[in-house]
Amino acid sequence: MKFSLGAPQFFWPKQEVEQFYQQAKNSSADIIYVGETVCSKRRELRDKDWLALAQELTKAGKQVVISTMTLLESPSELQVLKRLCNNGDLLVEANDLSAVQVMNELKLPFVVGAAINCYNLATLKVLLKQGMSRWVMPVELSGDWLKQLLNEAEDEGVRSQFEAEVFSWGYMPLAYSARCFTARSEDKAKDDCQYCCINYPQGRRMNSREGERVFVLNGIQTMSGYQYNLINEVSDMQAMGVDVVRISPDSELALQKLDDFRAQLLAPKHYPLDGNAECNGYWHKIAGMSVQ
């Protein structure tokens, strides 16, 4: 089993991004994803900067994956996508079907991100024909569902053709919209947002009328209000054949979580989850905000 750091979902200043990846370079991560996945207006790092960073991490011995945008809305965004896909030698995480098409045209393997709705064996087989080499399970699906799907893939003789990766820690990306919720929360138009999401390095928390933290707003992205935490499921994931466990960085704390998850392979122990800040409900087929 390998452990990965997902691409940062929040908008951080360039210096902080570079500092984070300097630490990630020396971390226990086997795989590191880099790139902007949420909003093309977040230009602290441009595509050439992400590619340069990827090369540096590769030299440090990490497997590096370039992550693409999740919701493309303009021809300029498509041009950036094509440049990232045709980068020369780095694996690409396709977070939109346009990236799948570009990678297929280039005849290159790719990772299918969790934002692509792949819920069954038929869809997996279609994506395999397109060139998929790794599949990240959509965050809202359960452990039982994953086990059944991987068994079906084994029965069909295609399981060996792809790796399975599970988003296992961090704020879950639940939905995307053409509207920018962070700008809206500051009464700004999306076209004149003044890049206000950089002021919220962990997004804007949104509570219900009862005061319960239900969502985190992150630009066009709606995220879970609680951090998903599957640290107690690592042994089960290993037993069912999960290849990669993903930690989603929201701060330097993610690097410590990475070590904690890896330690579960050697000396498993039960971590009590904080029901006021963490959840694992989707994995157990109960309400997503719940803990079991």
Image (cartoon, grey):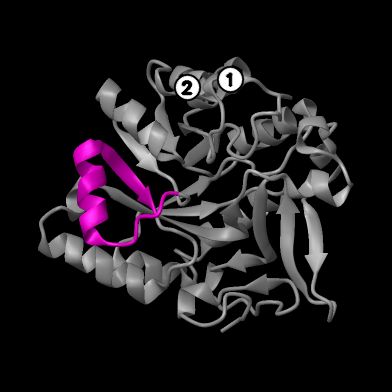
Check residue 84 in the rendering and tell me which mark sits there, or answer none.
2
Q: How much space separates mark 1 and mark 2, taking CA atoms?
A: 7 Å
Instruction: From the viewer's side, name the closer residue of 60 and 106.
Output: 106
Residue 239 found in image quarter:
bottom left
Examine the rendered structure and indicate whether residue 41 appears above or below residue 162: above
Relative image position of residue 45 (x, y in whole percent): 68, 23
Check residue 292 in the rendering and tell me which mark sits there, or answer none.
none
Check residue 47 in the rendering and tell me which mark sits there, or answer none.
1
Residue 201 found in image quarter:
top right
Quick one: label 2, few (<14), some, or many (20+) residues within 10 Å?
many
Q: Quadrant of the N terminus?
A: bottom left
| Residue 147 falls left or right of residue 22 | left
* Type of amino acid under label 2: Leu
The segment highlighted magenta reads 116-136
Residue 127 magenta-highlighted: yes
The reply to whether residue 251 is in sight is no
* Type of amino acid under label 1: Asp
Asked if the residues shown at circle 1 and circle 2 are in contact, with their CB atoms under 8 angstroms apart, the answer is yes
Examine the rendered structure and indicate whether residue 97 appears above or below residue 236: above
